[in-house]
């Protein structure tokens, strides 16, 4: 079973590791985000926002808006 992604956190997301406000964002339509390698795996539709902290480099995924 696939766990639901955390909800969209807005245009200035807060890092889930260090708390820094601001992250790079990349939309991924397919596959899984492979943090920290930042690689898309597979071709199953699985839209998500791939976030990476600008300070510590921590990566996490968030749900897209419908």
Image (spheres, helix red, strand yellow):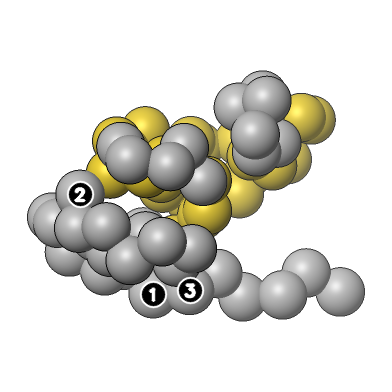
Horizontally, residue 50 falls left or right of residue 30, namely left
Which residue matches tag 1?
7
Assess whether mark 2 and mark 1 are in contact (beta carbons under 8 angstroms): no
Whether label 1 touches label 3, CB < 8 Å: yes
**Identity of the residue drawn at 48% across and 74% down:** 6
Q: Nearer the viewer, residue 16 or 41?
A: 16
Helix, strand or loop status at disc 2: loop
Residue that badge 3 annotates: 6
Question: For this rendering, which residue is in front, 45 or 1?
Answer: 1
User: How far is disc 1 from disc 2 in space, using C-alphas?
Assistant: 16 Å
When asked about the image quadrant of residue 51, the answer is: top left
Image coordinates for residue 20, horizontal then vertical, percent: 27, 57
Local SS, label 3:
loop
Which numbered disc covers residue 22? 2
Q: Quadrant of the C terminus?
A: bottom left
| Kind of element beneath mark 1 | loop
* Distance from Cα at disc 1 to Cα at disc 3: 4 Å
* Residue at position x 13%, y 55% in the image: 11
> What residue is shown at x 30% (from left), y 37% (from top)?
54
Comparing labels 3 and 2, the label whose residue is closer to the camera = 2
Specify whether residue 50 is in view. Answer: no
Of the numbered discs in the image, which one, if any, rests on residue 65? none
Going from N to C along the chain, the mark reached first, 3 or 2, is: 3
């Amino acid at each position: 079973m696939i766990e639901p992604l955390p909800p969209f956190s807005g245009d200035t997301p807060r890092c889930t590791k260090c708390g820094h406000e601001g992250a790079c964002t990349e939309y991924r339509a397919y596959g899984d985000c492979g943090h920290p390698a930042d690689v898309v795996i597979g071709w199953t539709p699985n839209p998500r926002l791939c976030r990476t902290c600008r300070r510590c480099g921590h990566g996490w995924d968030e749900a897209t808006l419908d």
